[in-house]
Image (cartoon, rainbow, N blue to C red):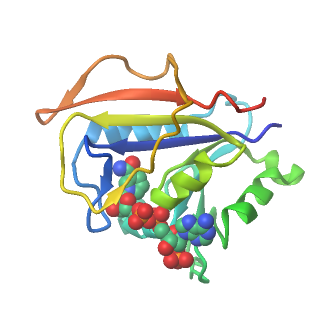
Amino acid sequence: MVLKLNLIAAACENMGIGKDNTLPWNLRTEMNFFTRMTSSIIDTNTMKKNVVIMGRRTWESIPDKFKPLSNRMNFILSKSDLDLKNYRDVYSFKSLEQCLEKLKCPEFQDLYESVWVIGGSNVYKECMESEHFYRLYLTQILKNFECDTFFPKIPDNLVTIRDSIVPEGVQSENGINFIYKVYENPNFKM
Ligand SMILES: NC(=O)c1ccc[n+]([C@@H]2O[C@H](COP(=O)([O-])OP(=O)(O)OC[C@H]3O[C@@H](n4cnc5c(N)ncnc54)[C@H](OP(=O)(O)O)[C@@H]3O)[C@@H](O)[C@H]2O)c1
């Protein structure tokens, strides 16, 4: 199986993604989209789940009642030893390399279907530099919010594609407009 990293993020006009370790906006439909995309399994005849990869601060930003993200294996990156013994289906890694090694293990490959990288900044950046970077699902919010965390520069060579699962056109909630964009890495080798 070829390891594909799918990134998923929401960014406002200045490419901000967070403020004070939370999201600067409250868009329920966008959050539902995130949950659907990262949880959906194509082969329902198996017990496989998807993997979500995140940095330690993104893990901490998830409210306790939603931790770990349900029906997904939660992979957390941190240089420190995290206390995760109270959680099931949660793994921590000291580097992205270690995390990718786990995903490439033949025994582990039977347990998951797709891999979603859910932030934050450095995790997105490192993953876009990886040979395994496949797609970026970016919700572009058509408004500016004050942010302290930003999406890294999107490589110039990515191509915009259509994915039938992604709603097209301008979406709207609470008077905020946003569009779902899908980018693909043309250098990804199947
Ligand atoms: N809008 C969106 O789509 C979106 C998505 C995700 C997050 N966010 C927002 O973004 C903010 C959090 O993102 P962030 O960029 O500040 O932090 P983050 O990437 O979630 O976490 C940073 C931490 O992750 C660990 N880490 C990152 N890369 C690593 C690597 N290669 N190897 C080992 N450890 C690594 C380090 O933890 P240690 O310090 O423990 O070593 C680092 O300090 C919050 O505001 C959150 O709400 C928004």
Q: Is residue 88 visible?
A: no
Residue displayed at 62% across by 31% down: 185
Query: Residue 4: x percent and y percent?
Result: 69, 39
| Quarter of the C terminus within the rendering | top right
Quarter of image, res 40 = top right
Quarter of image, res 20 = bottom left
Quarter of image, res 171 = top left
Query: Residue 69: x percent and y percent?
Result: 49, 55
Residue displayed at 25% across by 58% down: 147
Residue sitting nearer the eye, 125 or 108: 125
Residue displayed at 70% across by 31% down: 187
Query: Residue 170: x percent and y percent?
Result: 26, 21
User: In this picture, is 135 found above or below 15?
Assistant: above
Left or right of 47: which side holds 11?
A: left
Residue sitting nearer the eye, 141 or 185: 185
Residue displayed at 26% across by 46% down: 14
